[in-house]
Structures are given as structure tokens and as C-alpha cells.
Image (cartoon, rainbow, N blue to C red):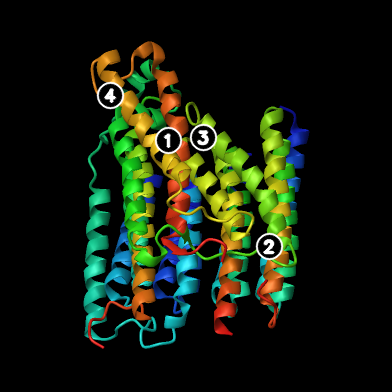
Amino acid sequence: MSLAPHTLTILAILAGAFFFMAGTIGLLRFPDPLSRLHALTKADNLGLGLVVLGLLFQAEGLLPALKLVAIWLLVLLAGATITQLIAHAARPNGSAG
Amino acid sequence: MDDFLLGAAGFVLAMVALGLVRILRGPGDADRIMAAQLLGTGGTAALLLLAQATSVPAAADVGLVLALLAAFVSVAFVKGAERSKVDGK
Amino acid sequence: MTDATVYGVCSAVLVGLGLFGLIMHPQPLRKILAFNLIGGGIFLLFGVVARRGAAAGLGGDPVPQALVITGLVVAFAATALTVALLLRLFEETGRATLRSDG
Amino acid sequence: MTLAMAFDIGLALLVVGVATWTIVAHNTFAAVVGFVAYGLLLALVWVRLAAPDVALTEAALGSGLTGGLLLGASTRLRRTETSEDAAELPAGALRLTAVGLCTLVAAGLSALVLLLPVPAATLAPQAMASIAATGLGNPVTAVLMAYRAIDTLLEVVVLLLALVGIWSLAPDRVWDSLPGPRHHADSEGFLTFIAQLLVPVGILVGIHIFWVGSDAPGGEFQGATILAAMWVLAMMAGLVDAPPVSRRWLRLVLVVGPAVFFAIGLAGFAMAGGFLAYPESHAKMLIVAIEMPVTLSIAAALALLVAGPPERAPGR
């Protein structure tokens, strides 16, 4: 196996780990729930995306690679919608639907 | 390479754990619902890394199930928070 | 020291923690939670025994692993039943407590 | 110390930390969130212990479905939290005694783990020796469906018994009505959207996990749990309503699994000379023939266990 995919994997996963760290720092430092929510979801979805990207270079075959992408898409779409739901629930006078 | 992936999985887990401390303390329910979000994303990432690092491809399936069920639990959280609001009125 | 030893001690601590919650918490729902915590510890102990039995090209002994899967399902059924009992008690009496006085 | 060992120790400490939170948290809702985290971390531990089948079950059932069930209960019981039963742990001598007792139990169990015999007892070689006769590739599924199939049959019956127990809690006046609270579709549509997105994907994943179970980690319990979670999700989002518990089709779905299982078990007397014995040439076909209806029955039973006893008339 050549060195190039390994390097790309390491770079992408390091970047992904950085975004997870950024999300956690945002969570620890931001004062109100809505901005914490924002920091958390943006950073984590990017973090997972970069981790998936890094692992794609290591995937053996098309099917495992597709599964990785599918997992990321699932988390991304579900996460975005749930963020809306949480923001809705966090509003002090949010109607209960 | 495997050691690097395992280390990355450990790092992501450690970050999730740090975030959990903040979240579990609350004060609001919204903060606690975020715990499911954080665990879903971070746990999935850790499992995918673990699958590659330890050559257990099935761990990716566990990650998939985790992502799905984390979304399910988040919806249950939101429904719960809404319901207690209605009860409180 | 092996990974099995680490998780073995971990499972023992979990059983101890869950037992503490089970006998000390006054709220029934917290007792149910604690009981499930003990369950997790016991299942983990099975997992450790399975891991130590790695042989014949397998990472662990499949028999205790299968036992844990059945155990998890039964534990869920028991939890659902106790939760339903608790909710019914609350509906009848307006309280969710095990105290008989008052 | 290797990196893998450091990872294991860190993960074990994390599990213990989350478990401690679940016990000491003041707010019950927060404790339930802690429990969900506990189940999720245990799923990681199961992967580390080379038990991906168990990891799947833990993630789906131990964390997901149990979490949903307990969250619902804690929301309904929330009004009692501020009353005299607040989650204050008793203090003083009683507490010290309890701490002592629990430390003793934990220490005893730890000693047991450290003193386990070497070499360890194992049934793995026996399990692998006869696996060819079952036609399966996953030894855990072979244990569940062939070597110890009678345990699995009884377990499916246990699920039905638990369901009968829950339904028996319904007062007479609401018998033959719908289980659980009525959920309405939300006005802004986010919940409807996420349910419409997740339910089809989840059904696919459930069938996938069930189907690969013969040869790879997965199987009927894991697949059925995912299917059950998707049905509960559709109910929570107001996409479908729970069926009245007296519907004939519902009863049929619940018993078809154990009935087929039992029938094929009895046929074993004629085909291979014993209860639940499979003739070698058709073992895999028979196992799959049992697994499909059993998965359906388990999924229905699990979802209805979460939904609870019947409590309201239809159309309300």
C-alpha cells in the first residue's frame, strides 16, 4: 500500500479530532443553550464528516465505503432536524405542538 | 496506522466525556437533550475508528445502529420535554 | 493485566454502585435504573468470561455471549413490566412511592 | 503500557463515572440521560471484548429502547419529584453501612475476576466443531438458534408473558382501547420530517442487521429491536396511531413467531429424532424459516412493551 492514502487519512482524522475538540470547547465556554447547541452540532457534524473522509481512504471495497458515507448522511440529516427540535423546545415560551 | 486510529478514537471519546460533564449539569432540559446528540455523533465516530483500528468490520454496523437509536432517543427526549411543559401549564 | 481484567474489575464496581442505588434510593424509578445498572455489570462479567475463553479462532466464547443477548432482552421485558406497574400505582394513588404509611 | 491498554482503562473509568452520575444525580431526568450514556459506552466495551453481536444488542436495546421507555416514565412521574419523595439519599450511619456493604460486594467480585482459573474454561471449540452442520457462519447465532434453541423459544414466550402482564394492568373500562398517550403531528413539521426520514432508513437497517445475522454479527433480536424502535418513533411523531390491543391481526403477529418456532421444533421429532433438532441438509433453511416470523413477533412485542397498557378510547 502506498504512503499517500495513509497521509491523507491521518490529516483528515486529525482535522476531525480538532473539530470535536472545538465543539467541546464551545460547549464548555458558551453561556446560553442556543449558542452551545450551534457550536456542538456544527463542530460535531464536521468532525464526523472528516473522520469518515479519513476512513474512506482505508476502506476496502465499494460497499464498506458506501456504508461509511450513509452513516455520515444519516447523522447529518437527523442531527440537523433534531437541532431544530431542541431549539424549539429550548425556547422559554415555545408552544408544545 | 492502527495505533493512530485507536488513539484518535480515544481522543474523540475523551472530548465527548468532557462535553458530557457540562451537559449533564444542565440546567435546562435542552442541555440534557444535547447529550444524546453529542453521544450519537461522538460515539459513532469512535466506533467507526475502532472498526478500522481493530479490524472488526461489524463495529461499523454498531456505529450505524448507534446513530439511528441516538436519533430515536433524541426524539423521545424532545417529546418528554414538550410533555412536561404541557403538564406544567 | 489484560483487557479482560480491566473490564472485569469495572463490572465488579458497576455491580457495587448499582446495589448502592438499589438499596438507598427512595424513588422506585431510581431503583429500576439502579437495577439495570447492576444488570449491565453482571452482563459485563459474562463478557469478560467469554473474552477469556477466546479459542478456535474466535475472539470470545460464543455461549456466554448468546446468554447475554437473551439476558438483555429479558431485562428489557422486566423493566417494561416494572415501569408499567409503577405508572399504574401513580395513576391510582397520585404518588409514586413505596412507603406504606401516609 | 500499550495504547490499547490505556484505551481500555480510560473507557472503563468513563463507564464507572457515568454509572456514578446515574446513581447520585438529583434530577431523575438527568439520571436517565446518564443511563443512556452508560448503555452507549457499554456498546463500545462490547466491541473491545470481541462481542459485536452483544454490542449491537446493547446499543439498540440496552441504551436505545430502554432509554426511550425510561424517559417516557420519568416525564410522567415528574410531578412527584418536588414532593416528599425527592431523591435525597439517606445520610448518616445507614449510608455508611450501605457503602461498606456495596464495597464488600464489589471487592468480592473483583477478587473472583482476578482468581478466575487459567487456562479459562471455554465452549468455543465445541461451538465451532459442529457449526458446519447448522449451515450458519456466526457462532453466536448458532448457539441461539441451534445448540440452545429451546432457550430462545422460551425467551420469546417470556416477552409475550411480560406483555400480558402489562396489558392486565389496564382498568376494565378502557380494556380494548389504545395503549399509550396520543401523539399529534407537530405544527412546524420537524418531527414529521425526521420520522419520515428515519423510519424507512431504520426499517432497512433493521432488515439488514437481521439478514446478515446468519453469517456476521447481527440477528433476529437486534433487527427486531430496531424495527420496534422505528414503530415507536412513528407513533411518537403522530404518523401512525397504536392499534387497539384486541385486534386479531395484532394478536396473530405476536404469536406467529413462537408458534412457527414450536411447530418446527415438534417436527424435529419426525425429521431428526428430537425436539428442535434440524436435519443437517435443511438446517439453515429451517433456521431462517423460524427467524423471520420470530423477528416480526419480537418487534411487535417490544414496541407494545414500550407503548404500555391500553388507556384511551380510539379517536381521542
Q: Which mark is residue A21?
A: 2
Mark 4 element type: helix
Label 1 and label 2 in one chain = no
Between tags 1 and 3, which lies in front? 1
Residue D289's image quarter? top left
Question: Answer yes or no: do the residues labelled 4 and 1 have beta carbons within 8 Å?
Answer: no
Toward the viewer: A8 or D70?
D70
Q: CA distance from mark 3 to mark 2?
A: 36 Å
Toward the viewer: A18 or C38?
C38
Residue picked out by circle 1: D294
Which amino acid type is shown beneath numbered disc 2?
Answer: Met
Q: CA distance from mark 3 to mark 4?
A: 25 Å
Pinpoint residue C50: horizontal percent, then vertical percent: 34, 39
Q: CA distance from mark 1 to mark 2?
A: 44 Å
Label 3 and label 4 in one chain = yes
Tag 1, which chain? D
Pinpoint residue D199: horizontal percent, then vertical percent: 63, 48
Taking C32 as reference, is C63 above or below it?
above
Which amino acid type is shown beneath numbered disc 1?
Answer: Val
Question: Answer yes or no: do the residues labelled 1 and 2 have beta carbons within 8 Å?
Answer: no
Pinpoint residue D172: horizontal percent, then vertical percent: 35, 64
Which amino acid type is shown beneath numbered disc 3?
Answer: Phe
Q: Residue at x 44, y 86 (%)?
A: D82
Q: Which numbered disc, 3 or 4, marks the residue that appears first in the sequence?
A: 3
Residue D281 located left or right of residue A78:
left
Label 1 and label 3 in one chain = yes
Tag 2, which chain? A
Question: Answer yes or no: do the residues labelled 1 and 3 have beta carbons within 8 Å?
Answer: no
Residue picked out by circle 4: D266
Residue C100 located left or right of residue C18:
left
Q: Is residue C1 visible?
A: no
Residue picked out by circle 3: D210
